[in-house]
Every structure is written in C-alpha cells, then in structure tokens.
Amino acid sequence: MVEHMFELPDPDAALSVVEDTYREESKLIARQLAAIADLLTVRTAEAEGIDPDPGWSMITGFTRTCAEVGAALNMAPAEASKLVVCAEALDMRLPRIAALLAEGRIDFRCVRAVVTRTELVDDDLVAKVDEELADRFRHWASWSRRRLITTIDAVVHAIDPEGVKERRATADYHRYCSVTKQLYGTALVHARVPATVGARIEQRITELAKSVCAKDPRTMDQRRADAFDALTENRGLRCQCGRDDCPVRGAGDDEPNRIGAVIHVIASAATVRGDSEQPGYLQGFGVIDAAQVRDIARNAAFRSVEEPTVTAEQARRYRPTAATARWVRVRDLTCRYPGCDRPAECCDLDHTTPFNHTDPAAGGLTVPRGLAAYCREHHRVKTFLTGRNGWRDVQLDDGTIVWTSPTGREYRTTPGAYDLFPQLRRQDAPAPSADPDDTPAEGLTLGRPTPRKRNRRRERAARVRRARRMLREQRPINAAQRELDRARRHEIKMRKRRNYSRFLRFLFKGDKPSNSPFAQWINEPLEPEELPPDWRPPPSPYPPQPDDPPF
Ligand SMILES: [Zn+2]
Ligand SMILES: [Zn+2]
C-alpha cells in the first residue's frame, strides 16, 4: 500500500486565494489611481500658479503628472497618460465606479472600458451614466468583456442619444481603406468601415476559411488571409489537403463563391418603425444606434422574436422549434457560462435539466425557459464535468442561471439581452434579490462620494471642449457628405434602370427607335454606370426657400 508522501493542496483554499488576490489587486489599483489624481491636483495647481491661463507654451499639470508617473512606473509616455486620464476620470466624473473599484467589486479592465467608452459624454450627463452603471455592476456577479461593453454602450445610448449619433457620424466620415507595402513581399490592408460592413466581411471570410476540409494544412489565420484574396476575386477557397478523396474537392478556385453574407440585427419594432431611439444589437458585434438599425432595416427581412408558446407535444421533443431556438439565442446573446463571450448564434442549445429520452414528460422539457445557449467548450464542461465534484446549473424562472462550481461556489449569469432590451424581461419575473454580498466588508466605507470640485476641472474641461467643438464643426460636413452619398447612389441606380430599359428596347425592337413621346431618352446611347469622383447632383428645380434648413 502506497501512502501519500505529502498532502495535496486544498482546491477550495487555493481558489480562495485566487479570489482574494483578485479583489486586493482592484483595491490596490484604486489606491494607485487615487494617488495619481492627488498628484494631478497638486501639479495642476502649481502650473496654474505660474500662469493662471493655461496656454500653449507652458507645461501643464497634466504633462507634469504624466512625466512623474511614467518615470515611477517605467511606462512609455502614451501609456502613462492613459493611466492619468483614467485616474482623472474616476476622480472627477465617475466617483461611483471609483468606489466599486476601491471595494474590489469590479476590476481595472472594467474601469478602463467605462472610462474610454464614456469619455465624450457631456459633464452634465455623466453623473447619470456613473450612477446607472454602478447600480448595474453592483448586482452583477459574472460578466464577460462583451457583456460589459454592451451594457456600457446601452447605458450611454439611453442617456446621451444625441451625442452617440454625432460621434458615429464623425467616425463614419473618417472611414478609409488603405493598402501599404510591407517588408518581405507582404502588404498590410487597413480599413475603417461601418460595423455592418465589418460584420459582413467577417462572416464571409469565416465561412470561406471553414469551407475547406479538416486535413487542410494551413492555420486558421492563413486560411482567413487566403479567403480575403478569394473574396476579392469572387471565387471559392480551394482545399490544399492534396487528397484525391477530399470531400470538398472541386469546390475550389473556379467556382464563384455564392455565399451571401447574412447579418442579424436585434431591435425593437418601435425602433424599426422610427417611433423609438432604443439602440439595436448587431449579432457578434455589439450595440448600434437606432439610425443604423433603420438603415439596415430598409433591405432586411424581419422576424418577430417573442417568447413562443410550445405545445405539450413540442415540449416533449428533444429538438426545440425554430422559434424557440431563435428566442433563446436572442435572449442570451452570448454563451451563458460565467465570463464567456462566444456569440449565441454559434452556441449549442442546452437543456438545463437534462432531457429524458426514455420518458420525455419526466425530464427537462424543451421549453424556452428550460434552454440556454452554451458554447461547445462550456457545453462539454457541463456535460462531462458533472456530479458532486463538477459543475451544476439551475435555471430560474427569470432566465438567471445559477452555476455551482466544483468547490461549491455559486456564479449567476443573467440573459445578455436584458441589458439592452428590458422589455424582454418577463413581467411577472421576480425582482432581482438583494445581493447577500452587498453588506460592506469591515474596514470599508460605503458612503456615496461626490465629485471633488477643484480647479483642475478647468484643464480637463478644456480638453473635452476641444473634442466636442470638433464634433460640432463636423456635424454639417457629415450631413452634407451623407446627402451627397445618397444622391450618388440614387443617380447610379437611375442610370442602371434607364440602361436596362434601353437594353430591353433593343431586344424587342432592334435598331428601331421607340416613338413614345414620354420616354425619348430610351433612344439615347447607354450611360456610364460609374460616376466620376467630382460628380455632383444637378441643382434642384425648386431652390430652397429662405426658411428651409440648409440640409
Ligand atoms: Zn481537403
Ligand atoms: Zn462558453
């Protein structure tokens, strides 16, 4: 009989250390950031003492602080200034988020996301954003990066819709596509495009890259790069396994790729009708604003996603109905394992209570609230790491899933779409129970801090004002550009339409001209279907009246 030479470490104790250090790390960073904010106060006061009007030539308090922080932390200037911006934002704009960090309830990753995604929100609105986000984070137990970003964006969209619209117009105005020559016979392709275009490109490249057989020797990255080339040449991707019996052999180079990209957007009917500015969700990408939703909706097919009622017979079948599957994926948005980000559209649907194949009526029924989206990896975790020493999950009536880990820890995940579409929540769903962990730990103060009013506000305000002024100046330029783009698209469409009529006339009447007095243009030669870059729409026969807005 072999005795254990030494005792194995206790997994529960080990995990406790992981949890404690995670919280301590957040608290330490909060202390560091608060100290940086203090330093900024002092240095700004000094800088303004020399010259009360911060101008160009002087070294501002911000620059002084960045220099000192950079030296102390061995940081490059850009990195140091990001940290100082973060410290300043927590101190001046986001005191409630700062308090959560100081309590170790959220981590620095979360704070950074909040700071960058709320940077251009007006000062008079940011307090509301701070409060709303802190409220939500306080009740969260498990969240993923995607979920975090979706929530921040949804809150900013709800509180500052005008600002969001303008920032998107500016970002859209700065779209570009560049190809630069690189070393060793390669090139770098860079493009900034609307999210919807990005989603389509991503989808087509992924589909092409996955269209080869499993024996293809290339890595996924290499296949994606080759797919990009195939896409520009409008052909498929040839498998390179070299086998005679390759299952996808033949579906290669010569065949034009017929894959049409389909993108899915989730939005409320009121937004599509134009009655609401509630943002939508571009699956796999994130929050998009109501105007973008309506843009897409013009050429889209619609499906209403309501919680389906299933018949008793459908509930006893293993496979969910299409409507049920759709509803669950829309409700969950991502895999429901704590922290997982994988989009629900590529997830498996799992019966939270296992389906009973021998007696379907006795097991987990195939009903909307008995299913959840799990990515393949976490579906495996649930299926194979089960039992007393494994992972167990229970789905509550409101769609919350309570996971119990091998060491008995509980993690809760709520459906992702609830952050964005509160109307999806069941009316009679129980209110979120108070977090038992909500009581402050010893030695912590939980008061509601208010932003400190200091003269360094001026310095920050000046930087933000500059950013906002740029946005304001950009507004008419964006509107004019949008109008021109629309006119160009319309002109090309009309030219194509006229050319097609001319072609039909030629088909039916040959060289004989049409003698219809209403469409003499049909006898004219074909028009070019591309516009010169300097094309402008002809002046309107109805000149604008003095009262008309300029656009
Ligand atoms: Zn092959
Ligand atoms: Zn997952």
Image (spheres, grey):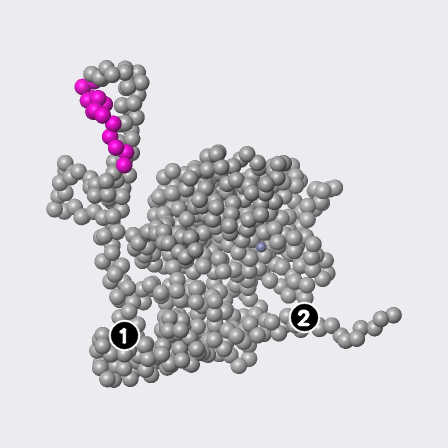
Q: Quadrant of residue 166?
A: bottom left
Q: Residues within 10 Å of mark 2 (few under 14, many from 20)?
A: few
**How dense is the environment of label 1, judged by Cα within 10 Å: few (below 14), some, or many (20 and up)?**
few
Residue numbers of the magenta segment: 516-530
- Circle 2 residue: 12
Q: 189 or 433, which lies in front?
A: 189
Q: Is residue 349 left or right of residue 122?
A: right
Q: Taking the image as four quarters, which one is ligand 2 found in?
A: bottom right
Residue 434 visible? The answer is yes
Residue at left offset 70%, top offset 72%? 10
Camera-nearest residue between 37 and 521? 521
* SS at circle 1: helix
Q: Regarding mark 2 in the picture, which secondary structure is present there?
A: helix
Percent position (x, y) of residue 32? 45, 78
Residue drawn at the location 55% of the way across and 62% of the way down: 142
> Mark 1 or 2 closer to N-term?
2
Q: Kindly indicate the quadrant of the structure image that contains residue 463.
A: bottom left
Q: Name the residue that disc number 1 marks.
A: 458
What's the mark number on residue 354?
Answer: none
Considering every residue shown, the one lying at the far left of the view is 546
In the image, what residue type sits under mark 1? Arg
Q: Is residue 226 shown above or below 6?
A: above
Query: What separation in Å lies between label 1 and label 2 (alpha carbons)?
Result: 50 Å
**Visible residue check, residue 103:** no
Residue 125 higher or lower than 346, as above or below: below
